[in-house]
Amino acid sequence: MTVYLIIAVSILIFFFIFLQKSGLFWHIFREKGTVYLTFDDGPQKDLTEKILSILEEENVKATFFCVGENVQRYPEIFEKIRKNGHAIGNHTMKHLHGWKSPNKIYFEDIAEANKLINSKLFRPPHGKMRFSQWWQLRKSFRIVFWTKIAYDWKKSNTPEKCFRLTKSVAKYGGIVVLHDNVKAEKNMLGVLPLFIKEAKKNGLIFKTLSA
């Protein structure tokens, strides 16, 4: 049984290494002492400003996966994200669900968004994409998923529960996802300071993702 377990674990490790080398990236192999704070769906007029204020006060840099339509609505906030030293990623133009979108439309939507966002980082909305979509996009993007997600948009959750869901990343490192959208606002603004405080307490360094 032990031999089979070792073989299974070895195959799993090889599989994840292959995915990362092929442009599909989870932070499964944690960079010691490092945490990556990411925000999906922005920018938003007031909410993004609140996030930026917290990050500036805490001297923390993050990666924002932006929706193209929101960049069009709030170009000045998008530029402020950049000027504040945060990284930018593509989150499609219209927040398309990969499983529900024909490839042609999906690729065109991402290309349209990248005219505004201009990034080699990509995160699929809902974390859903087809193998064929990944196979094509890996040629142009580093496709980033996550170690833990806060589920901050769920009304049934509380900031404390969101923190419990992400606490392991604040302790050991990895990629965490919070949401820069109205549905998540209350929980996200509640969990963000808790997460930063815990990560700093554990001596983690906040870094931005790079392509």
Image: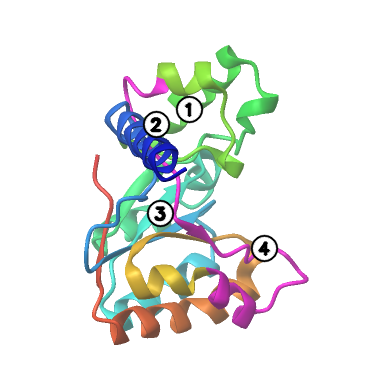
**Residue 46, percent across and down?**
54, 69
Return the residue at label 2.
114
| Alpha carbon separation for disc pair 4 and 3 | 17 Å
Precedes in sequence: disc 4 or disc 3: 3
Q: Mark 4 vs mark 3: give the one in front.
A: 4
What residue type is disc 2 on? Answer: Asn
Q: Give above or below for 134 relative to 94.
A: above
Disc 3 secondary structure class: strand
**Residue 142, percent across and down?**
32, 34
Precedes in sequence: disc 4 or disc 2: 2
| Alpha carbon separation for disc pair 1 and 2 | 6 Å
Q: Give above or below for 174 relative to 104.
A: below
| Alpha carbon separation for disc pair 1 and 3 | 16 Å
Q: Are marks 4 and 3 in contact (CB under 8 Å)?
A: no
Q: Are marks 1 and 2 in contact (CB under 8 Å)?
A: yes
> Which mark, residue 153?
4
Q: What residue range appears in magenta?
A: 137-165
- Magenta span includes 148: yes
Please state if 129 lies on the left or on the right of 198 as rendered: right
Precedes in sequence: disc 1 or disc 3: 3
Q: Residue furthest front?
A: 1
Return the residue at label 3.
64
**Which residue is drawn at the image coordinates 29% and 55% (left, top)?**
82
Please state if 43 lies on the left or on the right of 128 as rendered: left
Work out which quarter of the rendered image holds the C terminus and state it.
Answer: top left
Q: Nearer the viewer, residue 68 or 39?
A: 39
Q: Residue furthest right?
A: 156
**Which residue is drawn at the image coordinates 54% and 61% (left, top)?**
180
